Image: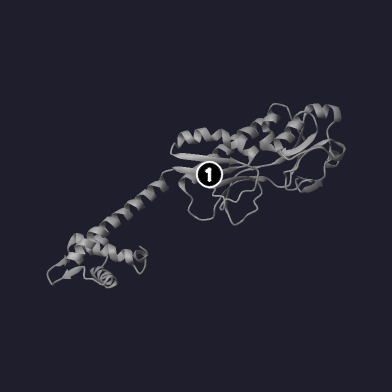
Amino acid sequence: MQELFEQGGLEQLAAFVAVGETGSFTGAAKKLERDASIISRRVSQLEERLGVRLVSRTTRRVALTEVGLQYHRRIQSILDELANASREASDVASSPQGLLRVSLPVTFGRQWVAPLLPDFLAKYPSIRIDARFTDRFVDVVAEGFDVAIRVGRLRDSSLTARRLATYRNLLVAAPSYLEIHGRPKSPEDLQKHACVGFSGYASWPDWPLSKGSKQQNVRPNCQLIADNSEAAVAAAIAGTGITFTADWLVGPAIREAQLVEVLKGWGGQGDGGVFAVLPPGRLVPTKTRIFVDEIAKSIKSGWKKSSAEMD
């Protein structure tokens, strides 16, 4: 089989099959849109490689030898199979189908991606999804994922990444906590307050804050430190203290007045991002591209609505 793909093997086979179908080098040349001399040369190269005469040439006509007829039948079936395989590959490329393996961060995936999956699968019934919810930094290539959704900042520049959305970090507390302890008026005041820390931030144990051109790192005094962001937010809602978290996580609690923003204007240093991380390569399967497009559209729509309601 390897010899078919070496030294122009497929071109030689195509030329020979076309000669057998049309009965002439001229006819084969028209069919393949090549010069007749090229067709003749490729057939001669094929005969030389096989060590057998496939075509009987006269001044009036071209005919396949007995060996040529047998070889033509076998090769025709092989080329037909190659053509069918190419069509099937094109169909798969143009039609979303097959298994899609997705890695999702636990909290973000549960809140923002999981609710979208049923509608996505109803829209594309030929796609199956294997969704893995983990806060572990997965190796997309080695572990065979088609796409990984990551929140924060990217660490691996060798992969292909697409930014799906941008978010900001902010300081929030429960109204009940603020009624008892008052509001901080500056970042320095946070040292006097009970705080709830999320140890999953890359900057932990510091809270990197900014307001316009001003930047300040604060190391909060935390009565509670959690490695789960939802647990930290739940404690803040219960009045345990002030926490520093993402707007996509606390939007519902702010809309329902369970939390309020404190030190408004002070937020995280630089916006965070939600990224779709793909294995390296320029060709993205249709199933992956459509999934990323749908997730990006839904997240942006949801965040736009959430931001409007928070304001």
- Using the image, determine if residue 144 lies above or below residue 8: above
Identify the image quadrant of residue 232.
Answer: top right
Classify 235 as above or below 25: above
Q: Residue at x 67, y 33 (%)?
A: 251
Q: Is residue 105 left or right of residue 57?
A: right
Residue 145 visible at all: yes
- 218 or 264: nearer the eye? 218
Residue at image position (48%, 53%) is 283
Where's the C terminus, which quadrant?
Answer: top right
Name the residue at 17% across, 63% down: 23
Q: Position of residue 86 (x, y in %)?
A: 36, 53
Q: Quadrant of residue 76?
A: bottom left
Image location of residue 241, percent across then percent down: 80, 33
Q: How many marks?
A: 1
The relative height of residue 91 versus residue 13 in the rendered view (above or below) is above
The quadrant in which the N terminus is found is bottom left
Percent x, y of residue 271: 68, 45
| Location of residue 207 with respect to 125 vertically, above or below | below
Q: Amino acid at mark 1?
A: Arg
Say what secondary structure mark 1 lies in: strand
Q: Residue furthest left?
A: 60
Whole-percent x, y for residue 27 in the image: 20, 63
Q: Which residue is mark 1?
A: 101
Q: Is residue 35 left or right of residue 130?
A: left
Q: On the rendered structure, is 245 left or right of 51?
A: right
Task: Look at the image and tell me whether residue 33 can be seen.
Answer: no
